Every structure is written in structure tokens, then in C-alpha cells.
Image (cartoon, rainbow, N blue to C red):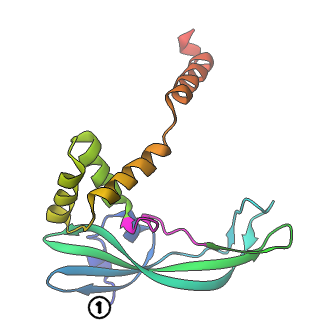
Amino acid sequence: MTPNPALLALFTDRAVQQNRVTDITLTDSVITLSLEPEIVARYVRPDCQHPVAVQPHDCEEITVQGLGVQGRALRYRVKTRRVAYTNDAGKFVTFTVPVPGLRTDLLVTDEVLEQALYFIIDRNLSLPVTAEMLRELYQVDTSASALERWKTMEAEQLPSVGQLIQHLNEKKDHDPASG
């Protein structure tokens, strides 16, 4: 099915809004959207002083789970793209173009991760119950051990208590109203 703008408007998640949808397939139990990330002409890279031009290198197709709708599973068939450039040291380097709205490392959308963390942290549900809720409500297949890894990965990105106190102290020192 060719992507129809009216149909695409029904999908409000970041993955659809920020990537190029190339195809939609509907079955009784699954909605599958084919996505490709937009490739820009130049990228800022840590090993280059100026944004660099890239050339296509290779691609791979993966399947990512989204929050299902109306009893149907939502799957994204994503064409991940690797591009290449030569860095300032003259070395040939490749990287995968980011796919906004998707966690390609976890094979889920940002919304699935956010919903899982909401169940675990805000609602204080156990990992097995969260896995069951995701399966029953959104047709997302995952396990308690995968949810534990997701939770740990996200927690590791948060600042420590000491960093939070330091940040608050810096903010207090620079806030004219505190003084």
C-alpha cells in the first residue's frame, strides 16, 4: 500500500513524523510501516573540525516494535543506512545514520520504552506484569529480563546524586533571585 498522507496523519509517534515512510502493509493482526531515515548532506562528527560530506556505504533492514493500535501490532521495517566519510586524520570512517524516534539498539520505538518505564517506575509494576501489560495492551513482545536491561540502561544515563547537588548549587549561585 502506498503511504497515504491522510493515513499517515493517524500515526503521531516520532518515528513516523521524523522519517520517510515508504510503504504501509495492513493485515488482520499487524500494521507494518517501512521507514528510511533522512540522510543530510553534511554531518557534524567528533573527529572532524567542520561538518563532513558523506557517501552511502551499506544498509541493513531491521524490524522494530511500536505501540500497537486497536488490537493490531505495530511494526516498523527500518532500512538502517551506514554512510562513510574521511576524517581530519585521513582515516576512512563509517557510522549508522540515526533514526529519530527509534531505539534501534533495543528494537523498539521511543514510545514503547517510555511506556515500559512508566509502568515500571510511575505505576510501580513488576517486570513480569509490565511485560504482560505491553503484550496485552500494545502487542509488544518483550521479556522481564529485557525490561530490566532497558531500565538499567536508562538509569545509567541519569546524573548521580552528587552531580544533581552540584548542579543545583551552581544554579543557586547563578540565580539572581536566590540572593
Residues packed near mark 1 inside 10 Å, few (<14), some (14 to 19) or many (20 plus): few
Can residue 99 be found in the magenta stretch?
yes
Residue at the extreme bottom of the image, as rendered:
1
Rendered view: 113 above or below 58: above
Q: Secondary structure at mark 1?
A: loop
On-image quarter of the N terminus = bottom left
Can residue 37 be found in the magenta stretch?
no
Q: Place residue 69 in its image quadrant.
A: bottom left
Which span of residues is magenta-colored? 96-108
Under mark 1, the amino acid is Met
Where does label 1 land, which residue?
1
User: Camera-side residue: 109 or 136?
Assistant: 136
Residue at the extreme right of the image, as rendered:
89
Residue pictured at 73% horizontal, 59% vertical: 46
User: Camera-side residue: 131 or 84?
Assistant: 131
User: Camera-side residue: 29 or 20?
Assistant: 29
Left or right: residue 95 versus residue 161 is right
Q: Place residue 113 in its image quadrant.
A: bottom left
On-image quarter of the C terminus = top right
Q: Place residue 59 in its image quadrant.
A: bottom right
Q: Position of residue 36 (x, y in %)?
A: 47, 79
